[in-house]
Amino acid sequence: MEWEVVIGLEIHTQLATKSKIFSGAATAYGAEPNTQACAVDLGLPGVLPVLNQEAVRMAVKFGLAVDAEVAERSVFARKNYFYPDLPKGYQISQFELPVVGKGHIDIELEDGTERRIGITRAHLEEDAGKSLHEDFHGQTGIDLNRAGTPLLEIVSEPDMRSAKEAVAYMKKIHSLVRYLEICDGNMQEGSFRCDANVSIRPKGQEKFGTRTELKNINSFRNVERAINIEIERQIDVLESGGEVIQETRLYDADKNETRSMRSKEEANDYRYFPDPDLLPLVIDAELINAIRETLPELPNQKRDRFINELGLSLYDASILTSSRELADYYEAVVAATGNKDPKQCANWVTVELSGALNRAGLEITESPVSAKQLASVLLRISDNTISGKIAKTVFEALWNGEGDDADAIIEAKGLKQVTDTGAIEAMVDEVIANHPEQFQQFREGKEQLLGFFVGQVMKASKGKANPAQVNELLKNKING
Ligand SMILES: Nc1ncnc2c1ncn2[C@@H]1O[C@H](COP(=O)(O)OP(=O)(O)OP(=O)(O)O)[C@@H](O)[C@H]1O
Ligand SMILES: [Mg+2]
Ligand SMILES: [Mg+2]
């Protein structure tokens, strides 16, 4: 039977506020355990939560960026459950009336087409503490520092049809929250994590199959692997006559398998009710408009501008706008080269620079070659001081910190392109003299040999001859 996969993601983004969502305790990562949880975070008797306005502003920003309705009135609710890292016995979340309603975001697929993914809602909530099972003297430790950290849970419609689409969506949201500067996106530290809901149905059937929920997957790679392995498992179950049960499963990256954690609780198991300690959240149009004013250029707007104003391909523009930092770097290169050749700048950033960064495991923000330095190389290609090939040598030297800019390196290493026709002609003559048979064939019309001769001359000049001039001279030699 042919199966169709259905996926919906719940993404938890930790909002980049300095203090907790309902208290003044710090949110900084990595503090000594249990030094950053105050009485409000622990829900001790007699305390009252006070909503952090910054968290609200960030949620609104997100809502506007995904074309969602921002609720004029939303309500905080208690979600009741017991877990050692939740001393209050309930989590403050939003249930019936979330702050952000229906919206959408467009993702690019590998075949170059776009697909719109619906966003069901995004709601504000507080995070719980953390149970530390590993490296803890065979015991479990509880660190409550994370309790009360603001989260925005972004719930998608079940609109994705493959693990690849789910990853593309997750990357798009990741990039967006970083553009908006509402989340640092650090997946190792758990600032951006996702639960993947997966089901399958016979192709052509309208009714969805039963979903399982894969919990807390903390890398793009693992999302893809976890979903694919879960799809295989569900197909196995159904094809051997079994039934998929609605449950929460844990992905074990070491074993590359998913395991049942618990049967999935239904909303009514949580006994949601409006939190009596918090007033409804009312956001007026004035505030929404003020926040709209602060929105930066969004990834897709930037991408379209790169295509329309800088003449880039959709492919290059998509890569360059995949992160705000990369886009900023690219634009700095374009500006520093006087906007002469944005396409060439794009090639160098996406190929040479990104390649070197990947090999070194560095982020764009850690690049040893600054945008200005890269621009200095490109300027010397444009004015024919160096060839594209020598430019790679110059780039490498800059990468290794051998000089401050392209000029210093070209000077120090004597890499200046030879444009003196006499000097090049002497090299051409020498190469011809060394390869008389080939030259005879070349003369008799074997045009493919042009490349061979150009190559030999370039080699003789150690890459410094101007290739255009070499071509020209060689052609003259046939006729001469
Ligand atoms: N049949 C299905 N197959 C795949 N995904 C589904 C299916 N039905 C719903 N989903 C997705 O499951 C997710 C449900 O998330 P939601 O937060 O609404 O509820 P929940 O998982 O029950 O609650 P909780 O926040 O307590 O985990 C959504 O992303 C939705 O698109
Ligand atoms: Mg949810
Ligand atoms: Mg869920």
Image (cartoon, helix red, strand yellow):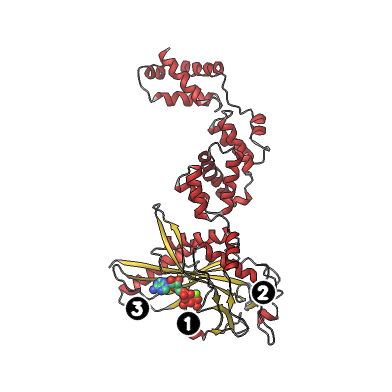
Q: Which residue is mark 2?
A: 145
**Residue identified by numbered label 1:** 267
- In the picture, which quadrant includes the C terminus? top left
Closest to the observer, 274 or 224: 274
Asked if the residue under mark 1 is in contact with the one under mark 3, i.e. CB atoms within 8 Å, the reply is no
Under 8 Å from ligand 1: the CB of mark 2?
no
> Three-letter amino acid code at disc 2?
Asn
Sequence-first tag of 3 and 1: 3
**Total numbered circles:** 3
Secondary structure beneath label 3: loop
Residue 138, x across and y down, in percent: 62, 77
For the residue marked with disc 1, what is the amino acid?
Ala
CB under 8 Å between discs 2 and 1: no
Q: Residue at x 50, y 68 (%)?
A: 69
Whether residue 40 is situated above or below residue 224 in the rendered picture = below
- Relative horizontal placement of residue 25, taking residue 219 as reference (left or right): right
